[in-house]
Image (tube, grey):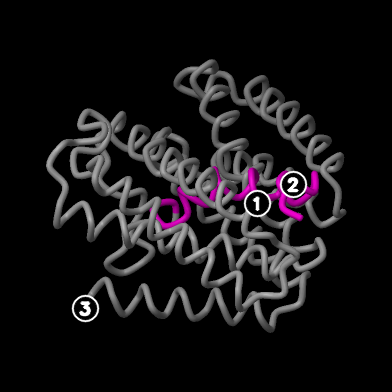
């Protein structure tokens, strides 16, 4: 129950926000999520980063997701450039304070792209036509995939998928997650006002689920590199925020480009 109740509450809050929340509120929530995600990321990967330097680093890394308020990919790209330049300026100003300038640069660059740029695409997705419905679909297929992978893997899983990265994940679980996630995507699409054809939905859902699994494994690799079990403890029974959105950080931008390029119509 320690996992079920928080999970249900999170799902209900996300659904309520997407169904009834205005675009500006949804985008603001993505910025708040980015702040929490960046804080968790830097605490894992650069624990010596504290105080003033940590605050300024997070502010600079937030620039791309904040630029999503302007509504185009070009502004996000401009935000990436500004963020990279800001990071370099921090290194030049705080060079004697930092343990290693190159490590700091590499860590912040990765954190900016991994968290801020990914969430910027989700923020942009909320502003397109049927944006809330696209996000509901993404959440549904991701949740369906995670649930299917967990229960199918627990019941039938024997051969490990990538034991060096995530010892509990199995090939059977991945196949189960793919099948159940795709099925959930089809069911949810029937309830949403989306211009989708089954012929484009099925391959797109499969691609998004696989990319989401890669995102999950990517975070596992980061945590294992720093001997960390959870990215944080902000969510009771669910670890950190990054532990909950790792799949979305990879699948979300891909869904945005699918929609932006008109590949799902």
207 and 66: which one is in front?
Answer: 207
CB under 8 Å between callouts 2 and 1? Answer: yes
5 and 66: which one is in front?
Answer: 5
Type of secondary structure dominating the magenta stretch: helix
Q: Which region of the structure is painted magenta? A: 242-265
Label 3 vs 1, first from the N-terminus: 3
Apparent side of residue 61 relative to residue 66 in the rendered image (left or right): left
**Residue 180: x %, y % from top left:** 38, 60
Mark 3 — residue? 1
**Which image quarter holds the N terminus?**
bottom left
Q: How far apart are marks 3 and 2 (CA)?
A: 40 Å
Q: Is residue 250 above or below residue 177?
A: above
Mark 2 — residue? 263
Based on the picture, tell me whether residue 231 belongs to the magenta stretch: no
**Residue 23: x %, y % from top left:** 77, 70
Q: How far apart are marks 3 and 1 (CA)?
A: 38 Å
CB under 8 Å between callouts 3 and 1? Answer: no
Q: Give the secondary structure at mark 2.
A: loop
Apparent side of residue 168 relative to residue 144 in the rendered image (left or right): left
Q: Residue at point 68% right, 23% down?
A: 88
97 and 221: which one is in front?
Answer: 221
Q: How crowded is mark 1: few (under 14 residues within 10 Å), some or many (20 or more)?
A: few
Apparent side of residue 255 relative to residue 170 in the rendered image (left or right): right
Which residue is farthest front? 199
Q: Is residue 20 above or below residue 80?
A: below
Q: Give the secondary structure at mark 3.
A: loop
Q: Residue at point 54% right, 18% down?
A: 101
Q: In this view, does 89 lie above or below 233?
A: above
Q: In which quarter of the image is residue 151?
A: bottom left
Q: Residue at point 79% right, 33% down?
A: 82
Q: Distance between the residues labelled 2 and 1?
A: 8 Å
């Amino acid at each position: 129950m320690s996992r079920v109740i928080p999970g249900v509450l999170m799902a209900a809050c996300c659904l309520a926000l997407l169904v009834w929340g205005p675009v500006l509120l949804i985008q603001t929530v993505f910025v708040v999520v980015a702040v929490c995600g960046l804080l968790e990321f830097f605490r894992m990967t650069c624990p010596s980063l504290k105080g003033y330097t940590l605050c300024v680093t997070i502010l600079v890394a937030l620039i791309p997701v904040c630029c999503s308020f302007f509504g185009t990919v070009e502004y996000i790209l401009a935000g990436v450039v500004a963020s990279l330049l800001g990071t370099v300026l921090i290194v030049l100003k705080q060079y004697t304070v930092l343990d290693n300038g190159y490590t700091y640069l590499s860590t912040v660059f990765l954190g900016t792209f991994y968290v801020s740029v990914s969430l910027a695409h989700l923020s942009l997705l909320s502003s397109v036509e049927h944006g809330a419905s696209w996000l509901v679909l993404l959440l549904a297929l991701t949740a369906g995939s995670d649930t299917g992978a967990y229960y199918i893997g627990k019941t039938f899983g024997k051969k490990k998928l990538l034991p060096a990265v995530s010892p509990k994940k199995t090939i059977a679980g991945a196949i189960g997650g793919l099948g159940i996630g795709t099925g959930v995507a089809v069911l949810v699409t029937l309830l949403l006002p989306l211009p989708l054809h089954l012929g484009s939905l099925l391959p797109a859902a499969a691609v998004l689920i696989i990319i989401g699994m890669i995102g999950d494994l990517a975070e596992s690799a980061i945590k294992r590199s720093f001997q960390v079990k959870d990215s944080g403890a902000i969510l009771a029974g669910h670890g950190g925020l990054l532990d909950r959105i790792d799949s979305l950080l990879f699948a979300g931008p891909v869904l945005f480009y699918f929609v932006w390029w008109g590949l799902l119509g």
